[in-house]
Amino acid sequence: MKVLDLRCANDHAFEGWFASEDDFQGQCVRGLLQCPVCGDTQVRKMLSAPRIQRGAAAERSAPAQAPVPVSGAASPPASSRGALPAALQAAWLQWARQAATQSEDVGERFAQEARNIHRGDSPERAIRGQASAAQALELLEEGIPVLALPATVTDTLH
Ligand SMILES: [Zn+2]
């Protein structure tokens, strides 16, 4: 699993999880990557080599509960397009909080439910929940986009 620091053409920094470097390149080429703040698709990768193996490391040291909503929650509301707040980090956190609030909490059923939605077995909607780094990687490899939210965001929901 690769955790990449990404940046859009408007200089918003955000994080993306990918199964591999090729996965990132593929999504980038197909225009599937989108800035969560402004929706820009001109996403480029920042150099962040020390963090690339973080997923694997986290898996070893702790069976981490990464809160990972599917990409249904990963696109910013259309109304935020074009808006460029000065406090971008705050804006991103606010958006993430909002996305998390508007998603359905499926808890530890997250990985299963994400697959069901992906296959069309469950109604399409934004969900959030817990998944291990391994589960998130499996979803990514199956082509199901997931997004990790900072714990500070999801903690405020309880
Ligand atoms: Zn942006």
Image (cartoon, helix red, strand yellow):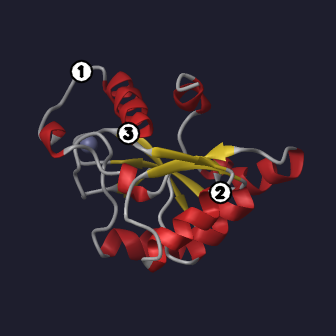
- On the image, numbered disc 1 is attached to which residue? 86
Label 1 neighbour load within 10 Å: few <14, some 14-19, many 20+: few
**Element type where label 3 sits in the image:** helix
Q: Amino acid at mark 2?
A: Arg
Give the image location of residue 98, x and y in percent. Answer: 36, 32
Quadrant of ligand 1: it is: top left
- On the image, numbered disc 3 is attached to which residue? 102
**Residue furthest to the right:** 61
Give the image location of residue 64, x and y in percent. Answer: 77, 45
| Direction from residue 95 to residue 20 in the image, left or right | right
User: Which residue is found at the position 38% from the left and 57% from the top?
Assistant: 125
Q: Would you say the residues marked 1 and 2 are in contact, meaning their CB atoms lie under 8 Å apart?
A: no
Q: Nearer the viewer, residue 74 or 60?
A: 74
39 in relation to 119, above or below: above
Instruction: Tell me the CA gap for discs 2 and 3.
Output: 18 Å
Q: Would you say the residues marked 1 and 3 are in contact, meaning their CB atoms lie under 8 Å apart?
A: no
Label 3 neighbour load within 10 Å: few <14, some 14-19, many 20+: some
Instruction: Tell me the CA gap for discs 1 and 3.
Output: 24 Å
Residue 109 tag number: 2
User: Which residue is found at the position 32% from the left and 56% from the top?
Assistant: 43
Q: Is residue 47 visible?
A: no
Q: Could you tell me which quadrant the N terminus lies in?
A: bottom right
- Earlier residue among tags 1 and 2: 1
Q: Amino acid at mark 3?
A: Gln
